[in-house]
Amino acid sequence: MTDDERKSLKQKTLAELEALQERISALEFSVGQIPPDSEMDSATRRESLDYKRRCEAEMRAAIARIPRLEATVKRIDAPDYGICVDCAKPIAMERLTESPDEFFCEECALD
Ligand SMILES: [Zn+2]
């Protein structure tokens, strides 16, 4: 991996981290905008409960992903970044470009 590739993966990870944090704030905001139950009829209430559950599920997924991305940002500068933790072969650049937080090469991920 070249220094430029490393740098661009790091920028990509930081950008994704920022986007996730923005997404979480946006979701928190939109859940907060849902009016109280007493102000809605039952159909609207069902719909808004459904919407709230979807927002919360997305928020949980985003929150769960953040530590992984933060760890990746720290790991990117280490010499063993981009090396499969299983077989110790380099992970394909295309694979890292797609998800910089990848720990396994394609073959090992399939096992
Ligand atoms: Zn491997």
Image (tube, grey):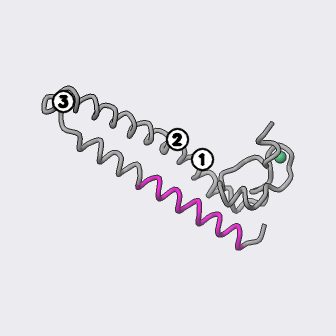
As drawn, the residue found furthest toward the top would be 42
* Mark 1 in CB contact with mark 2 (< 8 angstroms): yes
- Amino acid carrying label 1: it is Arg
The residue shown at (53%, 58%) is 16
Instruction: Give neighbour class at mark 3: few <14, some 14-19, many 20+ (Cα, 10 Å).
Output: few
Mark sitting earlier along the chain (3/2): 3
Residue at disc 2, secondary structure: helix
Percent x, y for residue 15?
A: 52, 62
What is the distance, in whole Å, between disc 3 and disc 2 at their CAs?
29 Å
Percent x, y for residue 43?
A: 22, 28
Q: Is 23 placed above or below 48 here? A: below
* Mark 3 in CB contact with mark 1 (< 8 angstroms): no
Residue at disc 1, secondary structure: helix
The residue shown at (33%, 36%) is 52
Q: Is residue 18 within the magenta segment? A: yes
The quarter of the displayed image where residue 5 is located: bottom right
What is the distance, in whole Å, between disc 1 and disc 2 at their CAs?
8 Å
Q: Which contiguous range is marked in magenta?
A: 4-22
Left or right position of 108 against 29: right
* Mark 3 in CB contact with mark 2 (< 8 angstroms): no
Residue designated by label 2: 64
Residue designated by label 3: 37
Percent x, y for residue 1?
A: 78, 66
| Disc number lying in front (3 or 1) | 3
Front-most of residues 3 and 48 = 48
Mark sitting on residue 68: 1
Mark 1 C-beta closer than 8 Å to ligand 1: no
The residue shown at (28%, 33%) is 47
Q: Is 78 placed above or below 7 here? A: above
Left or right position of 12 against 1: left
| Disc number lying in front (3 or 2) | 3
